[in-house]
Image (cartoon, rainbow, N blue to C red):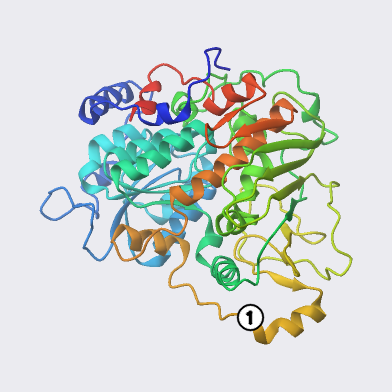
């Protein structure tokens, strides 16, 4: 934790230095990373299919048939993102980067695209192929989104980054400022913002079907990686995991990126990082963006004025609780009344649901987890929205809302506004935004406050403390420790420069 006095976030966001000098410095730093010979750039692809025929730097307002896309993080969820972009027919994959290049979880995507140049350090990728890259997708762990994303933006590259945008409130603040400063297309991976859920919520709030909402219940009650098992009790941890030998395929220092120094252990890898405060954002950061994202945008929630850890089961200083109930309290916004959003996670931490709810709303577009299984048979992830005169039930991702009870839904059917069809899926929306044809629906300006709100919930989980927040100053008013966590852990040597872009 940073022991210095808290720094006001708007001041941090304005920090900068000449980009050319900065890039020269960080690329030099990247050159000393311990990377196996031959892995930095694949021999087959230094020219690559994506190289402009004339060798000149391409304009940011790309006018070609396809967008030249570099992909950072190519295993597990990263591979799913790459395939989704490829499927649109609008992307030309020109570079791959992964700190664990050649590891088992990267093999399938490498076989599918054998001629794409390969890098193990994103800084060297930009150094070698910057002129050929027009956009970047970032599918790395939460804590490493920030340095990749902000460097790409500073170089004039459009960026698609998985949710949540970054690991700390401060990092998100800087990314929102960079979106304005560098005038690039910036999209957070939040698929519900390009499908029926988004367009329905927008139409129903616009028509006054959803109005004067005072309460939202949101829940995700499937088992998580950090839940105790007979073999291992995460809730009893008293230290980080013991050191293990670093695999030959992995650049451990590069994997850590701006995070604090840790000794390597396989228990941090391939999705296990989600369990740890130092690396992930728990169930809230993983699922909140898919469950209450449209409510956050169209009800203009912004940042809460209070976050209350109503119940934490198995609180631990290293990993997330076994179960959490968090109350986010938002003030009156214009003509809209105060609102309380209550989040529930944990297998047995089931919220009270309306007696006339009927069957929960499922989902058909929830991506499979990188390992394990999301159990949705009993109660799939979802929400209940309590508005004036009407109550709604909803699911996750693109699932649409339903009015409850069913009898009232039938009576309302003829009075509901027409919901337009989406002109593009989330991946195509980003690529079309790169071309100037559409605007990113989950831009950083939209997604940033959502992710900051969720990050505030993580701070309440970590400290197990009720927190009061000044929305104007963007500071907690009752906890110095919480304000230090807004800033995040101080970056390691040679990584602090990213905060100055």
Q: Measuring from the top left, give residue 181's x and y in whole percent.
A: 31, 41
For residue 106, side relative to residue 471 (left or right): left
Quadrant of the rendered image containing residue 91: bottom left
Residue 442 on image: x %, y %: 47, 55
Number of numbered discs? 1
Q: Quadrant of the C terminus?
A: top left
Residue nearest the viewer, comparing 325 with 473: 473
Q: Is residue 44 above or below residue 437?
A: above
Q: Which residue: 70% across, 37% down?
A: 307
The answer to whether 490 is drawn above or below residue 196 in the figure is: above
Secondary structure of the residue carrying tag 1 is: loop
Figure quadrant of the N terminus = top right
Relative side of 329 to 56, left or right: right
Residue furthest toward the top? 3
Outermost residue, front side: 335
Residue 444 in sight here: yes
Left or right, residue 318 beside residue 54: right
């Amino acid at each position: 934790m940073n022991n210095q006095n808290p720094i006001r976030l708007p001041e941090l966001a304005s920090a900068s230095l000449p980009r050319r000098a900065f890039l020269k410095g960080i690329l030099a730093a990247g050159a000393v990373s311990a990377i196996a010979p031959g892995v930095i750039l694949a021999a087959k692809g230094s020219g690559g299919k994506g190289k402009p025929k004339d060798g000149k730097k391409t304009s940011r307002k790309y006018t070609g048939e396809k967008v030249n896309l570099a992909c950072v993080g190519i295993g597990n969820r990263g591979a799913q993102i790459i395939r989704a972009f490829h499927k649109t027919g609008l992307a030309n994959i020109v570079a791959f980067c992964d700190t664990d290049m050649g590891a088992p979880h990267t093999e399938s995507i490498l076989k599918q695209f054998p001629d794409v140049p390969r890098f193990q350090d994103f800084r060297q990728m930009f150094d070698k192929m910057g002129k050929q890259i027009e956009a970047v997708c970032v599918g790395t762990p939460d804590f490493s989104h920030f340095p990749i994303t902000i460097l790409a933006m500073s170089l004039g590259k459009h960026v698609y980054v998985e949710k949540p945008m970054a690991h700390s409130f401060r990092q998100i603040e800087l990314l929102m400022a960079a979106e304005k400063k560098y005038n690039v297309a910036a999209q957070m991976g939040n698929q519900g913002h390009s499908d029926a859920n988004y367009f329905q919520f927008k139409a129903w709030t616009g028509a006054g079907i959803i109005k004067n909402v005072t309460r939202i219940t949101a829940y995700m009650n499937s088992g998580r990686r950090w839940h105790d098992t007979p073999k291992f009790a995460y809730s009893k941890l008293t230290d980080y995991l013991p050191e293990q030998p670093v695999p030959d395929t992995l650049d451990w220092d590069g994997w850590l990126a701006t995070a604090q120094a840790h000794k390597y252990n396989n228990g941090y890898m391939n999705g296990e990082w989600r369990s740890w405060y130092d690396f992930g954002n728990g169930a809230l950061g993983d699922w909140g963006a898919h469950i209450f994202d449209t409510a956050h945008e169209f009800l203009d929630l912004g940042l809460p004025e209070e976050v209350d850890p109503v119940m934490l089961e198995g609180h631990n200083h290293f990993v997330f609780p076994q179960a959490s109930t968090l109350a986010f309290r938002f003030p009156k916004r214009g003509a809209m009344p105060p609102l309380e959003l209550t989040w529930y996670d944990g297998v047995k931490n089931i919220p009270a649901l309306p007696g006339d709810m009927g069957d929960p709303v499922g989902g058909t577009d929830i991506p499979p987890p990188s390992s394990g299984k999301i159990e949705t048979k009993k109660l799939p992830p979802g929400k209940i929205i309590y508005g004036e005169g009407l109550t709604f039930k909803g699911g996750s991702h693109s699932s649409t809302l339903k009015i409850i009870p069913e009898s009232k839904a039938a009576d309302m059917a003829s009075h509901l506004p027409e919901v337009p069809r989406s002109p593009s899926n989330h991946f195509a929306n980003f690529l079309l935004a790169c071309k100037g044809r559409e605007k990113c629906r989950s831009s950083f300006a939209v997604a940033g406050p959502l992710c900051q709100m969720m990050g505030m919930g993580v701070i309440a989980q970590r400290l197990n403390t009720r927190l009061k927040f000044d929305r104007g100053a963007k500071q907690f008013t009752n906890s110095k420790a919480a304000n230090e966590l807004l800033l995040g852990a101080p970056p390691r040597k040679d990584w602090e420069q990213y905060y100055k872009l």
